Image (cartoon, rainbow, N blue to C red):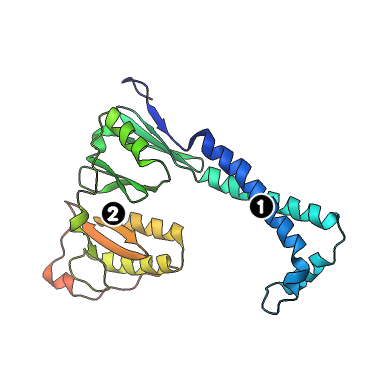
Amino acid sequence: MDGYGAPTVVDGGAAELALLWGGFPVLGAGAGWLLTAGAGWLAELPWAPAQDLLELVAGLPDPQASIGGLAVGALGGLVVAAIGTAERLAVTVGAERVGLRRDGTRWEVQRREVRAVFLDGRELVLLGPDDEELVREKSDLAPDRLRAAFREHGWPWAEADPHRDAYRRWVPGLPGLPVGADALLRARQRALDDDRGGEARELRGELARCGVVVRDERKRQYWRLTRSAARPRPEDATSPEPEVDGR
C-alpha cells in the first residue's frame, strides 16, 4: 500500500465470518423447523398473520414439511450471512493513506488530507483540513484495534470529536445556516423518518458542499459549519427557503 512499513488491516476476521456463515444458517434452520412444527397451533390463533399460509404448511405431510422448513430457514440464514458479509467494513491503515472497503467498493484517503481521526459512537470519522468530514462510516470494528492501528502509523487520533460542542440541533427555520441548507435538512429529515438511508446519505453530501457537517442522534439532526462555509447574511438568515422534494 505504501513504502512506509506494512499496513495494518482491521476487519472482523475469521471469527466474524464463521459466525455469519455458520451461525445464521443454523439459527434460520432452527426457526424454520419450529415454524413448521407449530404451524397448526399458530393457524388457530385469530390474531396470527398469514393464517392461510400457516394452514397450508400445517397440512403438509411429514417428513417433507420439516425438511422444507429446515431448508427454507437455512436459505434465509445464508441470505442474511451474505448481506452481513457485504456490509462489513474493512480498514487498512498505512503511513501515507488509509483504505476502506465495504460492499465491494474500495476508496482511499491520503494522510496529508486528514486533520483528525476519531470514533463517534459506532462511526469512524476522518476530518479534513477545513474540518469537513472526509469519512463517516458505521463500523462494528473493535475501537481498541482501530485506535492502535491509526496511532501505530502516526495518524492524528482523537479520543472524541474535537468539534462536539459546536453542533446545534436542527430546527426548521433556525437562523445561522447557509442559503439552501435548511431546505436540504428538511428533505433529509423526511428521509430519516422514512428510513431511506441511501437518500439521507446523498443529502449529507449535498450539505457538505454547502459547508454544513451533520450528525444524527435517534433521527434527530445536529449541524455545524466548516471553517470556510459561507456565513449567512442578516437578510438571508430569516428569509423563507423553498422545500426540497426528498422523495
Check the picture and name the quadrant holding the N terminus: top left
The residue tagged 2 is 209
Residue 78 seen in render? no
Above or below, comparing residue 126 to residue 236 in the picture: above
Q: Residues within 10 Å of mark 1 (few under 14, many from 20)?
A: many
- Residue type at the position of mark 1: Gly
Please give the name of the residue rendered at 80% of the width and 55% of the height, measured from the top-left corner: 66
Is 86 placed above or below 40 here?
above
Q: Residue 170 placed where, x, y %?
A: 26, 67
| Residue in the foreground of this view, choosing between 243 and 10 | 10
At 15% from the left and 61% from the top, the residue drawn is 231
| Picture quadrant of residue 215 | bottom left
Q: Secondary structure at mark 2?
A: helix
Q: Quadrant of residue 37?
A: bottom right
Q: Residues within 10 Å of mark 2 (few under 14, many from 20)?
A: few
Q: Is residue 41 left or right of residue 126?
A: right
For the point 29% across and 54% down, the residue is 208
Residue 214 lies, in percent from the top left, at: 29, 58
- At label 2, the amino acid type is Arg
How far across and how far down the image is residue 78, in percent?
65, 47
- The mark tally for this picture is 2
Looking at the image, which is closer to me, 136 or 130?
136
- Look at the numbered disc 1 and give the secondary structure of its residue: helix
Q: Give the label on residue 149, or none.
A: none
Location of residue 100 (image quadrant): top left
Residue hosting label 1: 28
The Cα atoms of the two marked residues, 1 and 2, are separated by 44 Å
Question: Which residue does the image show at 37% across and 65% down from the upper left?
Answer: 219
Q: Residue furthest right?
A: 61
Q: Is residue 87 visible?
A: yes
